[in-house]
């Protein structure tokens, strides 16, 4: 699986690499849910800097992560989203709901 | 109108074939010398159409999916995706943003993305017979001279 | 023997389609989780077979080329490339290293490379009817578990 | 065209990038021939470090460059050949005829 996570001071970073379509969506959602159940992190940063392609299946994945974090009163961020997935997320208005961040994650930035 | 170049592909409705289908169409369309954004738009639209055929057209059986790509003069790429699956009862409703019969796992944005990312987009469907989508992308002409090379 | 997964592609014998054909087959074969070298071997062999159909099978006309790829258990990828072109009079002679009817521009190494890079390789041809080549590549099983995923 | 050349002290470097199949072969041969006609360089270094794929069509291209240089009593080198094209060239025995070099081209190395 092209997905992994690491703890940082600010919360948990989940990194996805490669292509994300319907074929990869279910397992990715399950991974995010498991991480949230296990750690109940204050912040989950979904790092998409190595995402090479995403279709609308990825919208459901992102919204799944967002809702699960919101339900425990915690925050969800998308980090370093490349142009192609960004266009897909924008078409669905996800950029008006979920917070995007770029570069190194700093406490002060994501605490805004 | 005669196409300048064309290809077709045929494959089983396995989700492991999604990556193949979008890569194959992108590799073919690349000869029109599109911008990276145009090529990504095509790849995204194809991924949506193929995913729909895999999950909606053939929900319980393994079916066959056809794609035909034709390149016409003036940098026009036409893509047709066809299945012989369950078909769509109400195409207008299905095309509404956020409409889905796929539950939590789907966003209902597939048709909206195909429509927005491509220049033209049409759906032909008959309940019980299957669905055909036809979409066209106009490729911008570059100063360096586009066209098939 | 039933295949686990399969696809077929069909395209015009334009040299601008060579890159598409090898990319499409490689994208499909990738789901068997091959090593980079194995995938490159497949891509190279397909490029040789498709080039032969483009330049030798249809020297003066625009013809159609078919490729079928099937994946069988135990990581076996079978590739069939078919044309309805001029055919080969003497297949044994044609398969000799360095034999070519293509002049200075060809090396005569196409068949030799297909044979060396793939696990099995066969040629069926009939003068005036066309040529079919069938090749198989065994994909090494990885410790992490190969197969379709 | 994904091909370009530059003069260096040691001769001419021709660099090819991308995939080289039958579709690209004729133009590439013509490019090499033109360079040789124009400059009659003492050494031609065919830099393949950015070659992403090559089939047997490339064998004819390499042999064309080699023969044209030999005919004017000059030397021909292949520089930084990646594994896939190297395997194709080896299958044809080209590595026993044409000289391969790696890294920066130095006068002393190619003068051997
Ligand atoms: N090829 C198809 N066969 C049958 N039904 C389809 C097909 N494509 C789309 N549909 C129907 O149209 C709805 C909307 O599709 P779409 O906008 O792509 O969103 P999603 O795939 O997320 O559901 C689907 O939920 C499904 O009911
Ligand atoms: N599909 C084909 N149709 C007709 N003739 C073919 C075909 N493939 C190969 N040949 C013949 O076999 C010869 C050897 O082919 P090959 O080993 O691939 O070398 P090359 O393509 O460099 O000539 C060709 O020169 C041609 O005469």
Image (tube, coloured by chain):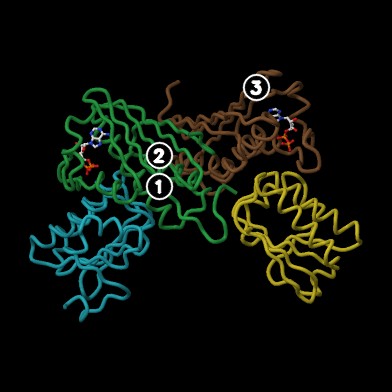
Chain colours: A cyan, B green, C brown, D yellow
Q: Is residue C33 above or below residue C96?
A: below
Q: Residues within 10 Å of mark 2 (few under 14, many from 20)?
A: many
Q: Is residue D107 above or below residue B82?
A: below
Ligand 1 found in image quarter: top left
Based on the displayed image, in which of its 4 quarters is residue A79 positioned?
bottom left
Give how far across and how far down residue B25 sits, in percent.
Answer: 44, 42
- Badge 1 and badge 2 both on one subunit: yes
Closer to the camera in the image, A77 or C82:
C82
Q: Is mark 3 within 8 Å of ligand 2?
A: yes
Q: Is residue C68 left or right of residue B125?
A: right
Of callouts 1 and 2, the N-terminal one: 2
- Badge 2 and badge 3 both on one subunit: no
Q: Is residue B103 left or right of residue B13?
A: left
Disc number lying in front (1 or 3): 1
Residue extending farthest bottom: A108
| Mark 1 vs 2: CB contact within 8 A | yes
The residue labelled by disc 2 is B79
Disc number lying in front (1 or 2): 1
Host chain of mark 3:
C
- Residue at 13% x, 58% y is A68
Give how far across and how far down residue C8 sits, in percent.
Answer: 47, 30
What number is the disc on residue C130?
Answer: 3
Q: Residues within 10 Å of mark 1 (few under 14, many from 20)?
A: many
The residue labelled by disc 1 is B137
- Residue at 8% x, 66% y is A73
Give how far across and how far down residue C52 sits, in percent.
Answer: 67, 34
């Amino acid at each position: 699986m092209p997905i992994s996570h690491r703890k940082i001071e600010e919360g948990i970073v989940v990194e996805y690499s490669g292509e994300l379509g319907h074929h990869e969506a279910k397992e990715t959602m399950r991974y995010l849910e498991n991480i949230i159940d296990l750690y109940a992190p204050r912040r989950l940063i979904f790092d998409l800097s190595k995402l090479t392609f995403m279709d609308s299946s990825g919208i459901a994945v992102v919204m799944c992560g967002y809702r699960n974090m919101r339900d425990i009163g915690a925050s969800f961020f998308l980090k370093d989203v490349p142009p192609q997935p960004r266009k897909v997320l924008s078409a669905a208005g996800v950029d008006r709901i979920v917070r995007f961040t770029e570069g190194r994650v700093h406490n002060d930035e994501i605490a805004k | 109108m005669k196409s300048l170049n064309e290809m077709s592909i045929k494959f089983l409705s396995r989700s492991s074939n999604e990556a193949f289908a979008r890569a194959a169409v992108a590799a073919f369309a690349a000869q029109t010398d599109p911008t990276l954004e145009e090529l990504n738009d095509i790849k995204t639209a194809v991924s949506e159409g193929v995913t729909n055929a895999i999950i909606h057209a053939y929900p319980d059986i393994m079916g066959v999916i056809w794609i035909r790509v034709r390149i016409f003069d003036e940098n026009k790429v036409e893509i047709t995706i066809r299945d012989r699956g369950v078909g769509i009862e109400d195409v207008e409703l299905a095309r509404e943003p956020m409409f889905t019969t796929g539950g939590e796992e789907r966003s209902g944005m597939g048709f909206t993305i195909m429509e927005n990312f491509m220049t033209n987009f049409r759906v032909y469907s008959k309940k019980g017979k299957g669905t055909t989508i036809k979409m066209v992308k106009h490729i911008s002409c570059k100063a360096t001279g586009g066209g098939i090379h």
